[in-house]
Amino acid sequence: MELHASHGYLFTQFLSSGINDREDEYGGPLENRARFLLEVIAAIRKTVGRDFHLGVKVNAIDFNDALFPWKEPGNTLDESIKVCKWIEEAGADHLHVSIGSIFPHPLLPSGGFPADELNWWYGIMGSSGVGSYRNYALFHFKVLRPIFLWLWNRTKKHHSIEGIVVPYARAVKQAVGIPVICTGGFQNPDLIRKVLTNGSCDAVSIGRPLVANNDLPRIIEEGREIAQPCTFCNRCLVNAVYNPLGCYDVTRFDYDQTSMINEVMRVFDPSRKPYIYGDSPRVLRGKTYSVKTLDTTFTDLVRESPVDLAQLRFRKRLLIAAIVLIAATVTVWLRR
């Protein structure tokens, strides 16, 4: 069992100084902000005893101002290490180290953030938060997308895509005595081997690369090349609010939308023949966008549906009509 005290979920809302504005015994000093999580751990231990494995996923750093720079930064690494020590003392069996006070966060999941597909699917989140309508407007109206994407991507240049959490997991591991799991976009076998052998962590957790290649552990174990690795486009994440979990990067399927959907739906019918990925390099056809990171430049497609294009044509016509109407009105007024 693992308690999720990261990524803006309930425990994070108590732990983070950038979010918690309570004035009672659960707010203010770090000891108070950690009280709720430690009480829950104690209650679990009281119920299940010491022979039941209990872990906690926790932020090493909040980076609460990574999206909106006017926000409070949240918990520092030193504060989080204190919390991790308290978690260990409370009876946790492992720590799962991550970063980011919200989810998704500009730094994690690392990689791209496809505003095109956010426009398609984010609408279902409209009633789910105080900022949902604002967010959807930023995704939906193309004139506003550059504002959002600048805010979202502005801190990525200081961080890697793969292994982004490793430095912080290493700091936590040096301070505690229980196993430390590190998350953060792992699929490179050499990097995984390195962080496991140099003392950075005791294990790594893998999410999106397993969505892209379900048999990734076997591929690594057998020493094979990954034919079509996860591109970290995060379209799986964006689609998950509305569609079945799967890889929605059509470039990995040679732009065959049908093959992509068939592979996604194979989770409901494993007897279906799996898609056989070719080993040709990924090619981006059409409009793209780029994000500068610490060690590379991430580039991905900008996909536009027929509805997007129809809306764009309608708005252009509406704008032209408005300009003609204003010009006609001004002309009539000047002739008086």
Image: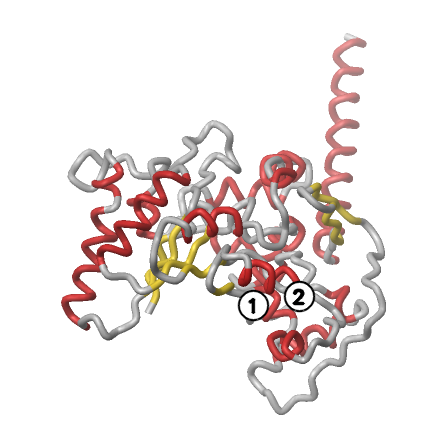
Q: Does residue 128 show up?
A: no
Residue at position x 74%, y 19% from top? 329
Asked whether 302 or 252 is in front, the reply is 252
Task: Indicate whether 94 appears above or below 97.
Answer: below
Q: Are marks 2 and 1 in contact (CB under 8 Å)?
A: yes
Tell me if 302 is positioned left or right of 136 in this view.
right
- Residue 229, image quadrant: bottom right
In the picture as drawn, the residue positioned furthest to the front comes out as 198
- The three-letter code of the residue at mark 2 reads Tyr
Residue 248, disc: 2
From the image, tell me which residue sits under label 1: 243
- Horizontal relation, residue 121 to residue 58: left or right: right
Give the residue at x 42% y 46%: 60
Q: How many marks?
A: 2
Work out how far the residue at label 2 is from the one at label 1, CA to CA, in angstroms: 10 Å
Residue 30: mark = none
Callout 1 amino acid: Asn
Kindly indicate the quadrant of the structure image that contains residue 5.
Answer: bottom left
Residue drawn at (80%, 15%) of the image: 331
Q: Is residue 91 left or right of residue 239?
A: left
In percent of width and height, residue 45 lies at 19, 66
**The N terminus appears in which quarter of the rendering?**
bottom left
The quarter of the image holding the C terminus is top right
Q: Quadrant of residue 44?
A: bottom left
Secondary structure of the residue carrying numbered label 2: loop
Question: Is residue 244 visible to the viewer in this orientation of the structure?
Answer: yes
Circle 1: element type: loop
Picture coordinates of residue 35, whole percent (x, y): 21, 47
The mark nearer the N terminus, 2 or 1, is: 1
